[in-house]
Amino acid sequence: MTERVALVTGGGRGIGREICLALARDERKVAVADLREPEAAETVALITAAGGTAIAVAMDVTSSDSVQQGILQVVDELGPIEVLVNCAGWDELKPFLSTDEDFWDRIIEINYKGVLRTVHACLPSMIEQGFGRIVNIGSDAGRVGSSLEAVYSGCKGGVIAFTKTIAREVARKGITANTVCPGPTQTPLIDEIVSASSSGDKVIGAMANAVPMKRLGQPSEVASAVAYFASEPAGFITGQTLSVSGGLTMA
Ligand SMILES: NC(=O)c1ccc[n+]([C@@H]2O[C@H](COP(=O)([O-])OP(=O)(O)OC[C@H]3O[C@@H](n4cnc5c(N)ncnc54)[C@H](O)[C@@H]3O)[C@@H](O)[C@H]2O)c1
């Protein structure tokens, strides 16, 4: 694989960390962007210990300034960004009628507008270089809905539609854009969701039970799909939505 520069948001832990490791194994130079700076530094340490190249980037995807600053750092230290993976995300389980507008805004800023910000900032140089791979992390919640995740599901559905539209707009520029949708996956976020909700255990148990393979996914299983979409051989695949969810969503 060519030594290209990849930016991964949410690369500090969970699925994002495994994506960073997978891209580094494919010889990408990886910018690990995250709010959680110590965790991002740990991901970098794992990559460099394995002989790869990576830098940690402090980035809050809810702030355009922070995204711009982070991208300037990446370009300065590693070069133009050719692979962009949007993995930063967050949710809390609540019935829709128990949520308020502050909660909606928080969910939308991270899960939807965070993706718009990085794509808006990275696309011009991808167009200039005539090469780009954008992989956005959606969710099966955005394909089939998920009880107690109404606004989050709306954002992830939006990410899927946004990705398809970008794929169309840049199809002749050497750039692909695809969405990978995890199902319930064993990550720190899932652990936090379970402990924050009185019925968290029940909900996650029900989610796993709904999966034909009867188990949660592993972050590395999501990462391998992302690495494929980010690869050179995937250059004729764009605007696609791929679930990595043990058969939870079949479409
Ligand atoms: N775990 C699941 O079951 C599951 C299922 C479907 C989709 N997803 C999606 O997968 C992605 C990764 O989830 P995860 O389970 O690994 O979560 P996680 O919380 O374990 O990791 C997410 C990372 O994103 C970072 N992040 C959060 N807000 C940020 C912000 N504003 N700016 C920069 N970084 C920020 C966090 O610090 C964290 O390191 C998310 O987009 C999530 O919606 C997860």
Image: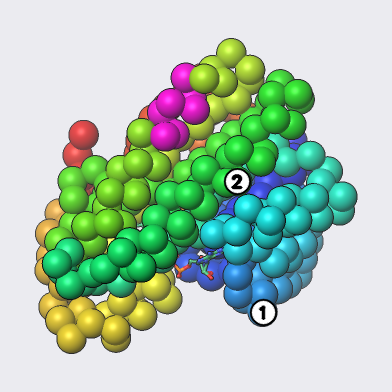
Which span is picked out in magenta? Answer: 162-168
Q: Which residue is mark 1?
A: 38
- Dot 2 beta carbon under 8 Å from ligand 1: no
Three-letter code, disc 2: Thr
224 over 15 or under it: above or below: above
Task: State ligand 1's quadrant.
Answer: bottom left
Position of residue 157 in the picture relative to residue 179 (left or right): left
- Please name the colour scheme applied to the rendered image: rainbow
Q: Is residue 75 left or right of residue 167?
A: right
- Residue 200 position in % (x across, y down): 20, 79
Q: Position of residue 227 (x, y in %)?
A: 54, 44
Question: Does residue 207 appear anywhere in the picture?
Answer: no
Residue 118: mark in rendering: 2
Q: Could you give the CA–CA distance between mark 1 and mark 2, rounded to whole angstroms?
A: 22 Å
Task: Please tell me whether mark 1 or mark 2 is closer to you in this view.
Answer: 2
User: Can you give x and y, in whole percent of width and height, for residue 15 in the image?
Assistant: 47, 61
Residue 166 included in the magenta stretch of the image = yes
93 lies left or right of 165: left
